Image (tube, helix red, strand yellow):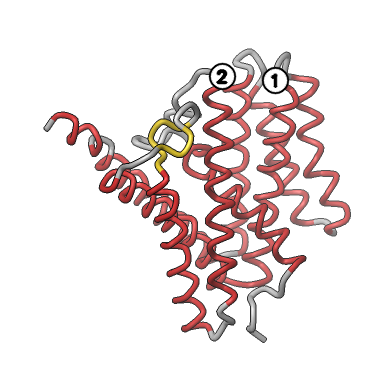
Amino acid sequence: MSAAKGRWDDLVPRLLSGGAVALIGLACVWFGGFLFLAMTVAVIAVMVWELTRMLDPEAPALIVAGVAGAALLLGEVVAPGFALPLLLAPSFVGFGQLSQRRATFALFTTMILLAGFGLLILRGEFGFVWMSWLVCVVVVTDISGYFAGRFLGGPLFWPRVSPKKTWSGTVAGWVGAGIVGAIFAVYMGAAWQLIGISISVSMASQLGDIAESTVKRRVGVKDSSNLLPGHGGLFDRFDGMLGAAVFLLLVEQLVDFPPGVL
């Protein structure tokens, strides 16, 4: 009984904090504009702050985070060609401020800034519906994986890095994302290719989660911070969205998106 209870002891705080984050995020996505921009900049800055503290506790995390937030904010108001060097600049600032793990910092900070920029592009160019599609794919992937992993169990995906992630949960995330893609394809008149795109975005979100878990394992921490009860920090909560958003930036260059929608 105690073992079964242990599998679910984080469910209530996860639901409460996750629900609060979801409601705030949904409101910002719905209204878009400055509100969505402010939320995205704040989240990106906090994630860089958490990353800096994990990799080098002695580094001035607030300064590095402030630079990252300012870079994304400026990147939104200038032409895309000028935004690109701004998005890469915080990685170089970190090289001068961190005394260790600089390459890891640069890689993840670049990914975080690109993901934030990609989310701004998605909301601005494709609107609330397709931003909601991306959020639904990532959330359903996470929820499906959580419950399938605890109900079905089975072989672990990568026990050394993520001791709770199972193959059953991983595959359930793909199935859930495919269902989301099918629903949006039907109601939005999109091509059935959206199912494949949704599954691939789900996979990318899982890779984002695994990448963050690898960093935490290397530095010996359980959570990126303690800002969100049951979830840890914003990096823990949005690691999947990072992978999904960066991947979607690539997808838009390879296939028509949204597929079949004029």
Figure label count: 2
Q: Which residue carries the number 2 mark? A: 219
Residue at x-position 75% and y-position 26%: 103
Would residue 262 appear left or right of 204 to someone viewing this image? right
- Between 24 and 192, the residue placed more toward the observer is 192
Q: Which x, y percent locates residue 107?
A: 72, 35
Q: Which quadrant holds the C terminus?
A: bottom right
Q: Which x, y percent locates residue 29?
A: 52, 62
Circle nearer the N terminus (2, 1)? 1
Q: Secondary structure at mark 2?
A: helix
Q: Which x, y percent locates residue 215?
A: 58, 28
Would residue 150 appear left or right of 171 to someone viewing this image? left
Decide if residue 60 is in sight here.
Answer: yes
Q: Which quadrant holds the N terminus?
A: top left
Residue at x-position 52% and y-position 45%: 238
- Between 54 and 90, the residue placed more toward the observer is 54
